[in-house]
Image (tube, helix red, strand yellow):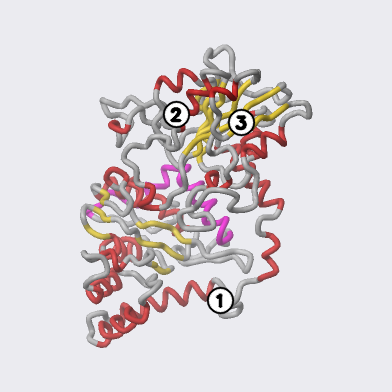
Amino acid sequence: MKDLNVCKDSRWGRSYESYSEDPEVVRKMTSLITGLQGQPPQGHPKGYPFVGGRNNVIACAKHFVGDGGTDKGINEGNTISSYEDLERIHLAPYLDCISQGVCTVMASYSSLNGRKLHADYFLLTEILKHKLGFKGFLISDWEALDRLADPYGSNYRNCILSTVNAGIDMVMVPFRYQFFLNELMYLVESGAIPMTRVDDAVERILRVKFVAGLFEHPLSDRSLLDLVGCKAHRELAREAVRKSLVLLKNGKDPKKPFLPLDRNAERILVTGTHADDLGYQCGGWTITWAGSSGRTTIGTTILDAVKEAVGDKTEVIYEQNPSPETFTGQAFSYAIVVVGEEPYAETGGDNPVLTIPFNGPELVSLVADKVPTLMILISGRPLVLEPSLLEKIDALIAAWLPGSEGVGITDVIFGDYEFQGRLPITWFKTVNQLPMRAGDNSFDPLFPFGFGLTSSKKVF
């Protein structure tokens, strides 16, 4: 990070090299970019795009900038921030992306202090391109130009003008592209969009295409298709699952941990809307934009994984929605109840209440009243966990969206591997506490940022 251009602006208040003080940010972003594009050689020019070869792909850093800090977390919302905080919190990861030769950056649908990012010349051109030295190309988000006007899609010529002149190099226009081209040509021929701006965009796009080898190899290498979803990929995904699980409770008595579970128990109950549903495990942006439920892809559900992990003499009873009669005459050693959110993407995920859907708490409570219970929560974010529910259950795991490899969960709950995950976000008690900021006088989380237990009683 120290080799980045040091730049300072009176509105930002500090040199950008100060971000090198956070090695964790540097490490995580470096691994993402180099994993996709490859590791740039020593001496690679600062800010210039890099692709390591045909087995690598172009990476995109997004969404620039402040997308994760919108007021009340609303998708496409407004980030209210000083320039100093924007720099310290939201801009920091992009510095590492640029240092690793990221090829593209995508602008955000959102606004900063009421200004649409897609039309923000200061941030897109003066900061990202000029001061940070980004030499790849800036791309718009899907139909982002239409979102600049009210009503949606109106005053299209002015939307093109403000977006392109702000610094967008490639525009994502999925449908009315002929209309876009006609309007763009008019703006260029009239001089409203200078040819120097067009030349800059073309130069940046060609630069990325050259480093990616698209002129030598315009089509993808179909011989690589057999690698997609191969055993090595699934093993890596399985490892990612078990390392990301966060154990939030382990036993009603701290001296008597509930996990790991006995894989040779006589009879166990597996239940819940998310116990046998790959679509729910994967969430949105899987197969379809918003995702769906069911056997949407090849993989292992949590139920599949439990059946695979237990002993030959263990009876696994599965009921998605057990009734009180389920427990009549059947002695269960324990229950695994898997509940959570339905898949969503973007605005479809905006949720002011953040309760567990599908009557999840009621189901967990019903089972926990009858049988010692491990609750597994499948979600893309913290959800409301009522104190009465937490008291009833014996153990709680935040499994996030584990994807296709449910075996990563059974690897840990049956004790083959230890829990390693820690909360990447503060877990609130009630939605009225949001947004939560550590250090506030009223800061009283259910689980603090970085919290995580192990089955050996250790607390991170």
Q: Residue 262: x percent and y percent?
A: 69, 22
Is 304 drawn above or below residue 40 in the view shown?
A: above
Closer to the eye: label 1 or 3: 3
Q: Position of residue 198 (x, y in %)?
A: 34, 80
Left or right of 453, for residue 143: left
Residue 87 drawn at (x, y percent): 31, 50
Q: Which residue is disc 2 drawn over?
A: 361
Q: Residue at x 55, y 71 (%)?
A: 212
Q: What kind of residue is marked 2? A: Pro
SS for tag 2? helix
The three-letter code of the residue at mark 1 reads Leu
Is residue 343 or residue 285 the one in the foreground? Answer: 343
Q: Amino acid at mark 3?
A: Val
Q: Is residue 452 above or below residue 93?
A: above
Left or right: 375 with respect to 429? right
Percent x, y for residue 387? 40, 21
Mark 1 or 3, nearer chain start: 1
- Mostly what secondary structure, the magenta segment? helix
| Residue ID at (61%, 37%) | 242
Q: What mark, if any, has residue 214 been given in the picture?
A: 1
Q: Which residues are magenta?
A: 10-38
For residue 231, say whether it is visible.
yes
Residue 34 among those drawn in magenta = yes
Left or right: 244 in relation to 105: right
Q: Report the side of 149 relative to 127 (left or right).
A: left
Q: What's the distance in space between the residues labelled 1 and 3, CA to CA?
A: 50 Å
Dot 1 falls on a residue whose secondary structure is loop
